[in-house]
Image: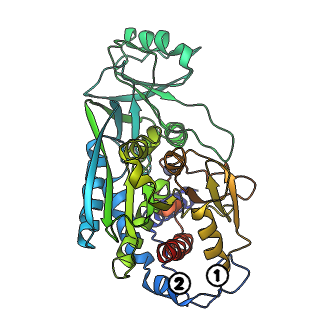
Amino acid sequence: MTDRSGLSRRGLLIAGVAAATAVPVAPAWGADELRPGAVTRPKLDKYDRQIVSGLSSDRALQHLQVLSERIGPRIGGTPSEKRAADYIAGQLDKFGYRTKLEPFPVADKFLAQITDIRGMLPDDLCWQAGAAPGGKLDVTVEGPVRDVGPASAPVWPADVAGAIVIADDTAAARPAFVAEAAARGAVGVILLPADQVFPRRASAFSPSGLTGAPIPVIGVAQVQKRLIREALAVVTALPLRISTAAYRGLISNNVIGERRGKSDGPIVMVSGHYDSVIGAPGANDDGSGTVLTMELARVFSRIPVDATLRFALWGSEEQGLIGSRYHVAQLPQAQRDRYRAVFQNDMVATSWDPAVTYWLLSFTGLANTATDAVRAAGQRLGYDAQLVGPVERGASDHQSFQEVGIAAANFSWRGELAPSYLEPPYHSPEDTIAKNVSLERLQVSMELIGCAAYAVARSS
Ligand SMILES: [Zn+2]
């Protein structure tokens, strides 16, 4: 029995390591070959061939590793987002674009980090969480974890003093619960979100509703809750360290690379957002759209067109389209009138099997130059059956442009039932390359948008 459990434990460890280091295999298909998931063979024109022969999902993957692994979560206005902005701007510079950062103010952020002192939790998961602005900030505490059950009706063990207390969160119970935990000598509180209905999983959060609590209070994601409780069930002690940090007076940035065409001529834009939510490495949301935009910028840098090309990566999308709304508000009407199409790419590479539909999402619900061009590119690439839309949906940066009458749409792989069927790792610590990225889907997305944008840029 001992040997068997020892072996299976080692097997689990090896599987865990493999999952952490697994890198998807770069797809390889000829220009005229049937694409994965497609039912008809492509019929590409000579311009499409220029795009598809130039694209490299390996290069896109390298950018994605920098963004989602080396930098990790990119929270609007914090140093993590700025590191990503500088990296993206450096690459667009290298491709020869006139590149600028467009700064704008955003709200304060309150973050936390969990460190597993004994090494009992999987280390291939992101352990960032949200901190309560009304709890103690810029502090590090450590102690053994004590699970008291629901915060609304806690069962207090005798040895709470010096411990980190975990409890199932309800917003109304927070003030009284945190006060009692502090009075009993707890050094910190981890609030656990309720499980959401599949395929949703709760995100990490900065708990609101507290003022002047004397200890740090943090909010974790559903997967972090599960793993902490699973560890508690099988170890004698689970000591954790939690650190909180406040970021105030923040500036977030859009990154925009431009190649000027004829003055007063048409503008074609490809875009994504490069920020992520708390606790999420943001590999698919929206590292995928970011690296698609960067790789298309590289490919187009060698393709002459008369139109002005703009490649834009928006900051602070996750707090309500703040970056793209700021950008559009600054755009003079004379420039707005020159836009032919904005191709926004938000979540374009999930490896979730049921995400077999490539949605054309329009804030107005109506077709426009962007949706028409992607539909036509889909037909040439053999994807007519997988493309659905235009369907009415905002909630990404295309909305900011459509609000002022510019032709724009968001493009995204999602479940076939409705565009609300997002993959389970969405907005969670599991939004990683290993758990949530298909290079095949990324390559297909790059082909669709590249061929569509080239067609619009040529015909403008
Ligand atoms: Zn997104």
Residue 171 picture quarter: top right
SS under mark 1: helix
Please say whether residue 154 is visible from this viewpoint: no
Please name the amino acid that badge 2 sits on: Asp
Instruction: Name the N-terminal-most of marks 2 and 1.
Output: 2
Residue at 29% x, 54% y is 85
Q: Is the Cβ of the residue at disc 2 closer than 8 Å to that at disc 1? A: yes
The location of residue 291, given as percent across then percent down, is 41, 65
The location of residue 391, given as percent across then percent down, is 69, 53
78, 358: nearer the viewer: 358
The label shown at residue 12 is none
**Mark 1 — residue?**
380
Please name the amino acid that badge 1 sits on: Arg
SS under mark 2: helix
Q: Is disc 2's CB within 8 Å of ligand 1?
A: no
Please determine whether, in this image, residue 146 is positioned above or below residue 102. Answer: above
142, 65: nearer the viewer: 65
Residue at 44% x, 38% y is 319
336, 194: nearer the viewer: 336
The location of residue 213, given as percent across then percent down, is 36, 13
In the shown orientation, is residue 260 left or right of residue 205?
Answer: left
Please determine whether, in this image, residue 203 is positioned above or below residue 256. Answer: above
In the shown orientation, is residue 371 left or right of residue 205?
Answer: right
**Mark 2 — residue?**
48
Please say whether residue 311 is visible from this viewpoint: yes
Q: Residues within 10 Å of mark 2 (few under 14, many from 20)?
A: many
